[in-house]
Image: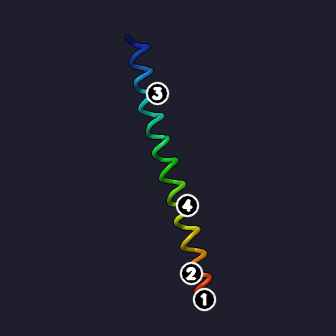
């Protein structure tokens, strides 16, 4: 049962990592877009 617990924890950690990665990519794209926009307007 300890192996099952480790697998569940690993799965939860993986989900969190995926969410963080997705959020990071989205915010990164967003910052690049705003950076481009603010510089093109000047």
Distance from Cα at disc 2 to Cα at disc 3: 41 Å
Q: Position of residue 10 (x, y in %)?
A: 46, 27
Mark-to-mark CA distance, 4 and 1: 22 Å
Crowding at dot 4, Cα within 10 Å, few <14 / some 14-19 / many 20+, comes out as few
Secondary structure, mark 1, is: loop
Question: For numbered disc 2, what is the local secondary structure?
Answer: helix
> Mark 2 to mark 4: distance in Å?
15 Å
Say which element carries label 4: helix
The answer to which of marks 2 and 3 sits earlier in the sequence is 3
Label 2 with label 3: CB-CB less than 8 Å:
no
Give the quadrant of residue 15: top left
Q: List x then y, in percent, for residue 32.
A: 59, 68
Q: Where is residue 5 in the image (x, y as percent from the top left)?
A: 39, 19
Q: Where is mark 1, residue-wise?
A: 42
Residue 37 vertical position relative to residue 32 in the rendered view, above or below: below
Residue 33 vs 16, above or below: the answer is below
Q: Name the mark on residue 28.
A: 4
Q: Earlier in the sequence, mark 4 or mark 1?
A: 4
- For the point 58% across and 86% down, the residue is 41
Reading the image, the residue beneath label 3 is 10
In the rendered view, tell whether residue 11 sits above or below residue 22.
above
Q: Could you tell me how far apart the alpha carbons at marks 1 and 3 are, in whole angstroms?
A: 48 Å
What is the spatial separation of the Cα atoms under label 4 and label 3, in whole angstroms?
26 Å
Of the residues under marks 4 and 3, which one precedes in the sequence? 3
- Find residue 34 and report its horizontal and vertical position in percent: 54, 73
């Amino acid at each position: 049962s300890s192996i099952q617990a480790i697998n569940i924890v690993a799965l939860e950690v993986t989900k969190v990592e995926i969410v963080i990665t997705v959020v990071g990519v989205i915010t990164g794209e967003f910052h690049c877009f705003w950076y481009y926009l603010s510089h093109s307007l000047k």
